Image (cartoon, coloured by chain):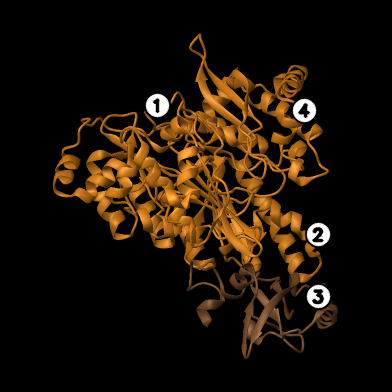
Chain colours: A orange, B brown
């Protein structure tokens, strides 16, 4: 993985000194809250319902064991023994004291991490496919380009005060696991007719109160133009994006109001006008950064693992885990292991210090020192030998980390909701917990099959509800929580926003409503091979609406 | 409706409530119940010095229902602030109750 050079280390140290001074001046009263707020936000420090919250970037979701151990240490020493992994490949600590934050940032800097640009109207943490560099279907590892974008966008003087926040995501595979079409800019590595690798570029995607699927602004962008083209997009946005209304300030609104064709012409004109050598990426630089992401030296192994087969024969729980949580690696005999942070009835994305330390140890022992954080709020060991799976499974099970539900109905994305967030209008975590308990990870979950439920506790949509196969949006109506359902959303290459079913459901009834949707789907699918999304796209909303809202038709809600 | 004034302590962000006499306390049961708008206005005038002295931030009054000795926030958001996350009964103020 990428290692800081002298410039990076000095850059982070400078920022740490600067922010430590700002914190001291705030605590001494030299700075008012109004003066301080922008500085704390630029360094990832929010004030939430109960306390401050510190959001730390995990660039493109890649972590080393050393870094994860440090996060465990911070959780234990400065927080309440746990951290929360988010939908943007960040980790959040919910209880840090402001006076401790300089010390926490110092600890982070010692392992080449920081919280810079995890908030504020700037280019945020650059995210990527959590299976990058290992997936069987990958064209090229997107992380070197993500790292180049990260370096370029860090305290970029022109783009530090954008109209609103700005999010970049990259995928190296045709199957999009990084939700790139709901980002301000999404980059998809593709091959052109000549066999060259480049990017398809999407612009103007986003969720929040005005959800939009990104438009493909370029079918093919040569890698050396990555920065110049990105600059052109962000520059047009910076100059033309609205600053009069924060709810209309994202690039998706500019694209919508200006019109996509006009936006494309403006970006292309800007790109052509300022296509200078300065921003052209030299191949030598791409190669230099790529070297940090060289795949580990994996010894050859038989495609079929005898150890796995033997354990599977004697242990159905292990078999379910291997079936559900192991994805196809590009090298035979290896797998990509998803460590679910969705224990049945647990809090999506939470990990204790002990769990983090275990995952770090497993990455060292079995995983070539690599850990990934997914936007689906799970951890991933991207290079594990199938032969080692029984030992890994036993270790995970001992720490409550062997839930066999990756991609199933209880693998739910949930924002923190009203239990932590000062913006939330309803709770989301307890709804996720109750759904998880209702369907669990046993035969019923397996029978239901691939299902992505995503829950947000307000219209800002941090829980990505618009692109859930089933989306749940928690709102407040007359002082009471109410939950609106959407069906048929998807964040992959077939990106689509879900359709609202109709009136919302109470906190008490929402899990029954989800069960009604699920039972309706199971009843109408053509076979178990027709997953929820395909079934929904075949039959549409009508049968679900009928089941949900016409009590006489059999709905129990 | 009765109200209580709350804020977050600057140094650690922890939710605090204003007690009679002007101290900031961590438990709602120790807070001063302000019976009407004029009492809230008067108390708000008194907390300005704490904001200027940088003891607390985000000062606001919220509605409470009083039944005998028991004080309960009216809105869910304020209930959660007064107790802690509903998902972690061992975290926040509820841990000490």
Real-space Cα distance between discs 2 and 4? 34 Å
**x, y percent for residue B64:** 68, 78
Q: Which residue is tagged 2?
A: A35
Label 2 in the same subunit as label 3: no
> For residue A36, which quarter of the picture?
bottom right
Q: CA distance from mark 4 to mark 3?
A: 48 Å
Is A347 left, or right, of A7 in this rendering?
A: left
Residue A53, given in percent of the width and then of the height, sits at 61, 61
For the residues bearing labels 2 and 4, Cβ distance under 8 angstroms: no
Would residue A502 appear left or right of A527 to someone viewing this image?
A: right
Depth check, mark 4 against mark 3: the one in front is 4
How far apart marks 1 and 2 lie (CA) works out to: 49 Å
Which element type, helix, strand or loop, lies under badge 3?
A: loop
Classify 10 Å Cα crowding around label 4: few (below 14), some (14-19), many (20 and above): some
Chain of the residue under the numbered disc 1 shown in the image: A
Foreground: disc 1 or disc 2:
1
Nearer the observer, A329 or A164: A164
Q: Distance from label 2 to label 3 (Cα)?
A: 15 Å
Disc 3 target residue: B53
Q: Position of residue A161 (x, y in %)?
A: 77, 43
Which of the two marks, 3 or 1, is nearer to us in this view?
Answer: 1
Q: Chain of mark 3?
A: B
Q: Which mark is residue A129?
A: none
Residues tagged 4 and 1 counted as in contact (Cβ below 8 A) = no
């Amino acid at each position: 993985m990428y290692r800081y050079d002298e410039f990076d280390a000095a850059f982070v140290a400078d920022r740490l000194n600067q922010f430590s001074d700002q914190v001291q001046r705030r605590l001494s009263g030299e700075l008012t809250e109004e003066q301080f707020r922008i500085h704390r936000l630029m360094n990832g420090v929010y004030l939430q319902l109960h306390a401050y919250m510190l959001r730390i970037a995990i660039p493109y979701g890649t972590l080393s064991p050393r870094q994860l151990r440090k996060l465990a240490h911070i959780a234990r020493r400065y927080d309440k023994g746990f951290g929360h992994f988010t939908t943007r490949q960040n980790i959040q600590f919910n209880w840090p004291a402001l006076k401790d934050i300089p010390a926490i940032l110092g600890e982070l800097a010692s392992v080449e991490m920081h919280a810079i640009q995890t908030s504020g109207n700037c280019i945020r943490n650059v995210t990527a496919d959590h299976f990058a560099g290992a997936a069987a279907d990958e064209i090229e590892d997107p992380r070197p380009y993500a790292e180049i974008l990260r370096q370029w966008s860090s305290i970029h003087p022109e783009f530090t005060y954008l109209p609103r926040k700005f999010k970049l995501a990259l995928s190296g595979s045709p199957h999009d696991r990084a939700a790139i079409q709901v980002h301000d800019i999404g980059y998809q590595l593709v091959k052109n007719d000549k066999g060259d690798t480049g990017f398809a570029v999407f612009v103007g995607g986003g969720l929040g109160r005005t959800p939009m699927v990104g438009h493909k602004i370029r079918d093919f962008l040569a890698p050396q133009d990555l920065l110049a083209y990105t600059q052109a997009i962000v520059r047009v946005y910076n100059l033309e994006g609205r600053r009069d209304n924060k709810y209309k300030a994202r690039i998706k609104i500019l694209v919508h109001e200006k019109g996509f064709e006009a936006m494309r012409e403006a970006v292309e004109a800007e790109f052509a006008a300022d296509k200078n050598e300065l921003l052209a990426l030299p191949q030598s630089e791409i190669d230099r950064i790529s070297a940090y992401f060289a795949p580990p030296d994996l010894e050859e192994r038989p495609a079929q693992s005898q150890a796995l087969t033997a354990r599977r024969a004697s242990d159905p729980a292990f078999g379910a885990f291997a079936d559900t949580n192991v994805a196809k690696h590009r090298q035979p005999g290896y797998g990509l292991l998803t460590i679910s942070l969705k224990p049945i009835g647990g809090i999506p994305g939470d990990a204790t210090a002990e769990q983090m330390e275990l995952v770090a140890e497993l990455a060292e022992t079995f995983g070539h020192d690599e850990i990934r954080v997914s936007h689906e709020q799970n951890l991933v060991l991207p290079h594990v030998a199938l032969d080692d799976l029984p030992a890994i499974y036993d270790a995970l099970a001992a720490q409550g980390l062997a839930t066999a539900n990756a991609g199933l109905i209880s693998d739910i994305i949930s924002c923190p909701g009203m239990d932590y967030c000062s913006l939330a209008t309803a709770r989301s975590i307890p709804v996720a917990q109750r759904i998880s308990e209702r369907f669990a990870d046993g035969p019923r979950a397996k029978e239901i099959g691939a299902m992505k439920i995503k829950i947000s506790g307000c219209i800002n949509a941090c829980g990505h509800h618009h692109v859930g196969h089933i989306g749940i949006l928690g709102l407040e109506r007359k002082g009471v929580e109410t939950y609106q359902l959407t069906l048929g959303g998807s964040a992959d290459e077939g990106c689509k926003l879900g359709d609202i079913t109709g009136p919302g459901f109470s906190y008490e009834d929402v899990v029954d409503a989800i069960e009604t949707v699920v039972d309706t789907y199971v009843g109408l699918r053509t076979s178990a091979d027709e997953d929820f999304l395909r079934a929904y796209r075949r039959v549409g909303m009508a049968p679900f609406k009928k089941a949900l809202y016409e009590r006489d038709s059999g709905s129990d809600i | 409706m009765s109200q209580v004034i709350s804020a977050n302590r600057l140094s650690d962000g922890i939710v605090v409530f204003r007690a009679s006499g002007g101290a900031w306390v961590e438990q709602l049961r120790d807070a001063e119940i302000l019976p009407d708008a004029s009492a809230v206005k008067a108390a708000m005038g008194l907390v300005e010095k704490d904001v200027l002295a940088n003891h607390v931030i985000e000062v606001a009054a919220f509605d409470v229902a009083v039944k005998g000795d028991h004080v309960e926030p009216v809105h869910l958001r304020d209930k959660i602030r007064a107790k802690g996350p509903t998902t972690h009964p061992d975290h926040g103020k509820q841990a000490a109750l």
